[in-house]
Image: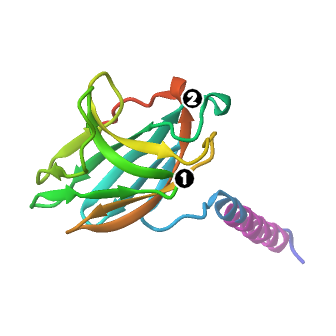
Amino acid sequence: MTRSHRTSGRRAALRALVAACLLLVCAACAEERGPDQWDRGGLVDGQVGAVQLIHAHVLAPPMDAQKAGDDLGLYVTLVNNSDRDQVLNGVSTVHADSVVYREGEEQPQPIAVTLPARRTVSLQEGHDRPHLELVGIHRPLGATPIDVTFRFPSAGTITLRVPVLPLSRGAGSPAPE
């Protein structure tokens, strides 16, 4: 065998080895998630129809400071990518008695959030900002992600595995990409 045949054989073997390594790395990095949900640094994003849900998360005190019956903030930014208004008319989880809409210190209201066409609605934390709230959690959640279902009559329904983050981790209001 000539030197050029050995060299080309080694190159082919090296290319095959690199391709196999890349395939293993890609497989190891893949998450178990639905095609409409992805994790971005501990915050969860998703999409149902023309509506994007960005940076969904719950903020909670430490596990030893939580108790059954507590209320916790649920935060998300909603982006309507369609040419017609969308409405978020329901949010639920088995981990709380209910989920409500709250604006500042006002009384909680049923969820009926209108998303104007081609607009963004922020339901992120901040002083007196509108947000969603888990009312009457059934048990301390700790840092365990919970399934939360968001319902849009026109766009559809999506369940996201929403992370429960420490209060100190407040994520702020993201800009849509």
Report, in whole angstroms, how far the alpha carbon at label 2 lies from the one at label 1.
15 Å
Q: Position of residue 151 (x, y in %)?
A: 31, 63
Q: Which mark is residue 146?
A: 1
Q: Quadrant of residue 22?
A: bottom right
Residue identified by numbered label 2: 61
* Magenta stretch holds residue 54: no
Magenta-tinted stretch: 4-23
Q: Main secondary structure of the magenta part?
A: helix
* Quadrant for the N terminus in the image: bottom right
In the displayed image of the protein, which residue is found farthest to the right? 1
> As rendered, which of 93 and 106 lies closer to the eye?
106
**Among numbered discs 2 and 1, the one appearing first in the sequence:** 2
Residue ID at (28%, 48%): 78
Residue ID at (9%, 61%): 84
Q: Is residue 114 above or below residue 101?
A: below
Q: Position of residue 118 (x, y in %)?
A: 14, 52
